[in-house]
């Protein structure tokens, strides 16, 4: 964003395995990292590094060995430098914390 205008780069694919659903994300502006959380039978997270209008992704990480329900919530806490994800598993509300290290 520059002034009152915005420009976009090309779309970046973060998972090529198909069947991606229920996506949430949080952005760490200081590190230029985005964490994307999604369901693909199980719950996964992946870190993207933002540079200008481009994004490159590391490898996905499994955080839940079953479905995570619809619309997982994702927040980044800049004081603790942690990502918090809330989701549904086996009809129960779940909360997990993660730390971004490099691209994972």
Image (cartoon, rainbow, N blue to C red):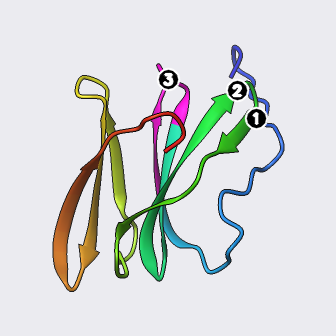
Q: Which residue is mark 3?
A: 31
* Cα–Cα span, label 2 and label 3: 10 Å
Which stretch did the figure color magenta?
A: 24-33
Residue 11 against residue 70 in the figure, above or below: above
Q: Is residue 57 above or below residue 49?
A: below
> Which residue is at the front of the view, 11 or 48?
48
C-alpha separation, residue under disc 1 versus residue under disc 3: 15 Å
Q: Mark 2: few, some, or many residues within 10 Å (few <14, many ≥20)?
A: few
Report helix, strand or loop for mark 1: strand
Q: Position of residue 93 (x, y in %)?
A: 17, 71
| Image quarter of residue 70 | bottom left
Q: Is residue 8 magenta?
A: no
**Residue 18 in the image: x percent, y percent?**
67, 78
User: Main SS of the magenta segment?
Assistant: strand
| Residue occupying the point 41% across, 38% down | 100
Q: Residue at x 78, y 50 (%)?
A: 11
From the image, which quarter does the N terminus lie in?
A: top right
**In the rendered structure, are the residues bearing label 1 and label 3 in contact, judged by CB atoms less than 8 Å apart?**
no
Mark closest to the chain's N terminus, 1 or 3: 3
- The reply to whether dot 2 and dot 1 touch (C-beta < 8 Å) is yes
Report the residue that reaches farthest toward the left: 92
Q: Estimate the spatial distance between the alpha carbons at disc 2 and disc 1, rounded to whole Å.
A: 5 Å
Lower position in the chain sequence, tag 2 or tag 3: 3
| Residue on which the image places disc 1 | 54
Task: Residue at 34% x, 57% y: name it.
Answer: 73
- The correct choice, above or below, for 34 with respect to 94 in the image is above
């Amino acid at each position: 964003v520059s002034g009152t205008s915005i420009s976009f780069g090309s779309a970046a694919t973060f998972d090529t395995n198909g069947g991606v659903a229920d996506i949430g994300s949080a952005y760490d502006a200081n590190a230029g990292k985005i964490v994307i959380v999604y369901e693909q039978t199980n719950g996964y997270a992946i870190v993207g590094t933002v540079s200008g209008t481009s994004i490159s992704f590391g490898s996905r990480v499994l955080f839940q060995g079953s479905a995570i329900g619809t619309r997982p919530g994702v927040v980044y806490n800049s004081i603790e430098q942690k990502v918090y994800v809330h989701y549904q598993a086996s009809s129960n509300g779940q909360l997990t914390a993660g730390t971004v290290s490099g691209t994972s």
